[in-house]
Amino acid sequence: MFEDLIPFYPLVTPFLLVLFRVAGVLAVAPFFDTNAIPMQVRALLALVMTFCIWQVVPPPPPAAVVPVNLIGVVVAVAGELTVGLVIGLMASIVFAGFRAGAYLISQQMGFALATIYDPAFDSQSTVIEQLAFWLALMVFLAMGGHREILSAVVYSYQTVPMGEGGLSADAMLGAVFGCLAAVYHAAIRIAMPALVTFFTATLTTGLMSRSMPQMNLMTIGISVNLIVGFLMVSVGIVSWAAVSRDSFHSLAAAIARLLNL
């Protein structure tokens, strides 16, 4: 029975390899990996994207397309999945920087203990974290980041042809360091103005407490931190959008370096 399917292997195997590269991206990339999109929809989306990309990718040598045994198929699929996961993680990890910076602000405001359930990611987070994430996601979509991710998948075949076994260790290590730098850069730019303001407010409250010992520092300090936090969040939303834009530009440059584009 399987011998009758051998003539179809040159068509089925490339489609399968492209499918796993696309599925790796959709598994971890922002906007695509939320629970708001049902698993059935994501599977159908992966099939549709695979059908479109499969038509335009450059054909690799036949020996790389059709593995001769099960081990070859597993190695080829693992390589394709690795490429997709790396591209998706590079985009997803930048959002972790926004949430980390927003968490520092929430901690200073006293919101770190008041977490709420986020059904989109099946986790607990603060209100400020969710605000920063959804703001960054809106900027990401407005800049066409979702299209850039899919374009990166298409152009990745120029650097890593189908069935070649994935990215090199040096390229993946460079991608990891580039993503970590982007995370810290985004988190510091979001949290630093608020943290400096919190420090100034705490120092001022402490000086006032020393000059007027009858003042209840604990009560006043909590109220001051809340007021300062809300003011900084209200004023800083515009700058958060600018930080998101710069971070996504850096992300696009990092993906281009990874794929030698």
Image (cartoon, rainbow, N blue to C red):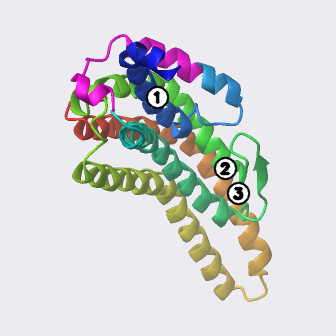
Q: CA distance from mark 1 to mark 3?
A: 46 Å
| Foreground residue among 77 and 95 | 77
SS type, badge 2: helix
Q: Locate residue 199 relative to residue 165 in the image: left or right.
A: right
Task: Check disc 3 and give the amino acid type.
Answer: Ile
Does residue 37 appear in the picture of this structure? no
Q: Residues within 10 Å of mark 2 (few under 14, many from 20)?
A: many
| Mark before the other along the chain sequence, 3 or 2 | 2
Label 1: which secondary element: helix
Image depth: mark 3 or mark 2 in front: 2
Residue visible at 51% across and 45% down? Answer: 95
Q: CA distance from mark 3 to mark 2?
A: 14 Å
User: Is disc 1 in contact with disc 3, using a CB cutoff of under 8 Å?
Assistant: no
Is residue 103 placed above or below 15 in the rendered structure? below
Of callouts 2 and 1, which one flags the residue occurring earlier in the amino acid sequence?
1
Residue 128 lies, in percent from the top left, at: 66, 50
Which region is colored magenta? 45-67
Q: Measuring 71% from the left and 32% from the top, which residue is drawn there?
A: 36
Residue 113, horizontal then vertical, whole percent:
76, 65
Closer to the chain start, of discs 1 and 3, is: 1
Q: Which mark is residue 128?
A: 2
Asked if residue 212 is positioned above or below residue 159 in the image, the reply reads below
Label annotation for residue 22: 1
Report the mark closest to the observer, 2 or 1: 1
* Residue plotted at (26% across, 18% down): 59
Mark 3 residue element? helix
Q: Which mark is residue 227?
A: 3
